[in-house]
Image (tube, rainbow, N blue to C red):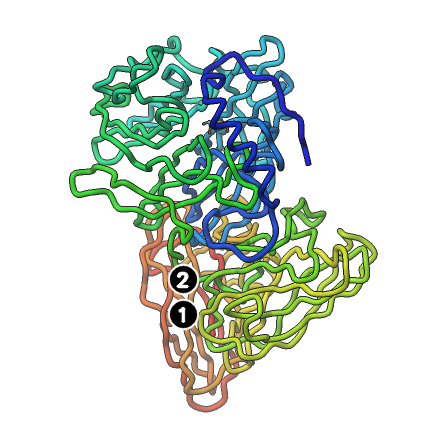
Amino acid sequence: MHPHPIGRPALARPRRAVAVIAALLLAVTLMPLLGGPARADNPIVQTIYTADPAPLVHNGRVYLYTGRDEDNSTYFTMKEWRVWSSADMVNWTDHGSPLNLASFSWASSNAWAGQAVERNGKFYWYVPMTARATGRMSIGVAVADSPTGPFRDALGHPLVENNEIDPTVFIDSDGQAYLYWGNPNLTYVKLNADMISYSGSPTRIPLTTAGFGTRTGDANRPTLYEEGPWVYKRGGTYYMVYAAKCCSEFIAYSTAPGPLGPWTYRGTVMPTQGGSFTNHPGIVDFNGSSYFFYHNGALPGGGGFTRSVAVEKFSYNADGSIPTITMTTAGAPQVGTLNPFVRQEAETIATEAGVETEASSEGGMNVANIENGDHVRVKGVAFGSGATSFTARVASATSGGRIEVRTGSPTGALAGTCTVPGTGGWQAWTSVSCPVSGLSGTKDLYLRFTGGSGFLLNVNWWQFTGAATGGNLLTNAGMEDGTSGWLVNGSGTLSTVTDVVRSGSRALAGTGRTGAWNGPGQDVTSRMTNGKSYSTSVWVRTPSGSPAAKATLALTANGTTSYLQLTPTATVNASGWTQVSGTATVSWSGTLTRAIFYVETAAGTDNLYLDDASFQ
Ligand code: FUB
């Protein structure tokens, strides 16, 4: 759809094998475009082509920064960068494009591989582009107050310009930040604490065969290092993972005792594979496991210029070496489950068929371009003891269609069908609800769209309601409707925050607590059944300290209040979200006049942040 091949920059790219590119171009023209039948969990993103993954773990989520390959590209025709995030490694939320070439007034083209990092509550995204004035590749830096942007050019000019690409940023444990980049050379600078300036001059890392392996057949490039460095530290060892030996590239790595070397070549991380003649690494630890991100040409129509990011879980060998990782279509296993009783963005997707996404007038993104037979799949949805109704936020400029709520497969068990009317516009939002049945336990959810021809409807978000005998008894449990439904048990103030969220765009903040027993809660009196066992799950964090938090039920019956501990105490802290969960049987004597579900701490009065709560 965007056939605008651009001129090649004067760097190493022309060295790449013309024959390989020609073969890939042929493959592109012979293959169908995105759409069609359901796909495996890898590639992660299936609505557009993505490339050059750069993961960042922040507040219990993995944020994935990527480039975007335009449809039908015949070159690295890239104009924007994209952000995705996930709390479970399989359902990824599309955050759109908070940064593009137009964000940099001095840039003309080539929105290539970058990386974002957090420092002191700000997010810095280093990206290479062609500078209009010189026609040379340069590296700019954008800054934002949240991992999903909006990002703005921090400088108004390149941070560095040496006609090379692919920045990776690393902050060492002593606070010193480094920016490395390069193709065909490998260069670094020491960033200042402001992250947008540097000290000293850009310095080349010697590309020795001991450090970066031996390449044969190219006198200009004696080592395997090609591009796409990714630098991090594990224990006392510094790792540099990079794309090796174009074309086709494989992923290799070197290690060093310090951030500046000396580097020792360690071998292959991922062999050449996957139908793209480039590859690009990104590695993070999340929730106690290690993950390797890369790209390939696995989507329909995919190839060297229409790439897609994917992920594999891996474990380091006992000696700290990285095992050889091969591409799979299964991808990483799910971490935990997804809660359907809190608002979920429709653009939180494991796999899909036929749909696209776009910016929503209500904020964030929505699922769009939905036609008859399309679907989205959300993996590992924990319906618990049951759901009774499904609500979706929808819009349609035509006469609408239907949302079939199914499990197991796109044609699996039908739990219910919601009819979507015409609303007068693709961004004219209304909510529709329909009863559902047969939903319990943990299942893959399929929202299958049916109707006439052409585009049917858009979906912004969805949420299930629990049965009277099950499901979530808390209202506004995902905190997306502000403080609605919540109260303060004891002293304090409620508000919502947007900079620290576990899912969606808001979390609840309980501030001004004057006792450990004070905290956010809900009145659940009318929803209690005497003698019933209830499951509680609430994600908690504190801005300072490490208190032990727990959920409690205060039951007042016949004028006497008793306190039931619903969960064991769990240590929560500032660096991430902790799930506080447990099961307890509720009972009382006489007439129940008040039941308050609330979260408290074992000691202290730290502020409490809550998100994604359920009590069922
Ligand atoms: O996506 C454009 C370029 O291709 C990146 O900058 C390189 O790392 C390679 O993936």
- Mark 2–mark 1 distance (CA, rounded to whole Å): 7 Å
Measured from the top left, where is residue 166 in percent x and y?
A: 45, 24
Q: Secondary structure at mark 2?
A: strand
| Residue 336 appears in the rendering | yes
Residue 267 shown left or right of residue 226 in the figure: left
Do the numbered discs 2 and 1 sit on residues whose CB atoms are within 8 Å?
yes
What x and y, as percent, mark residue 471?
51, 74
Is 89 rendered above or below residue 477? Answer: above
- Residue 234 in percent (x, y) is at 25, 35
Q: Which residue is mark 2?
A: 600
- Front residue of 147/594: it is 147
The image shows residue 103, relative to residue 207, as above or below, that is below
Q: Residue furthest bottom?
A: 590
Q: Nearer the viewer, residue 144 or 585?
A: 144
SS class of the residue under badge 1? strand
In this view of the protein, which residue sits in the foreground, 407 or 586? Answer: 407
Q: Quadrant of residue 201?
A: top left
Above or below, 431 against 508 in this view is below
Q: Is residue 34 left or right of residue 138?
A: right
Who's the residue at 54% across and 37% down the image? 27
For badge 2, the amino acid type reads Glu
In the rendered structure, which disc, 2 or 1, sits on the residue that comes first in sequence?
1
The N terminus lies in which quarter of the figure? top right
**Mark 1 lies on residue:** 552
At x 57%, y 46%, the residue is: 94
Residue at 40% across, 45% down: 311
Foreground of the two, 137 or 528 = 137
Identified by mark 1, the residue type is Thr
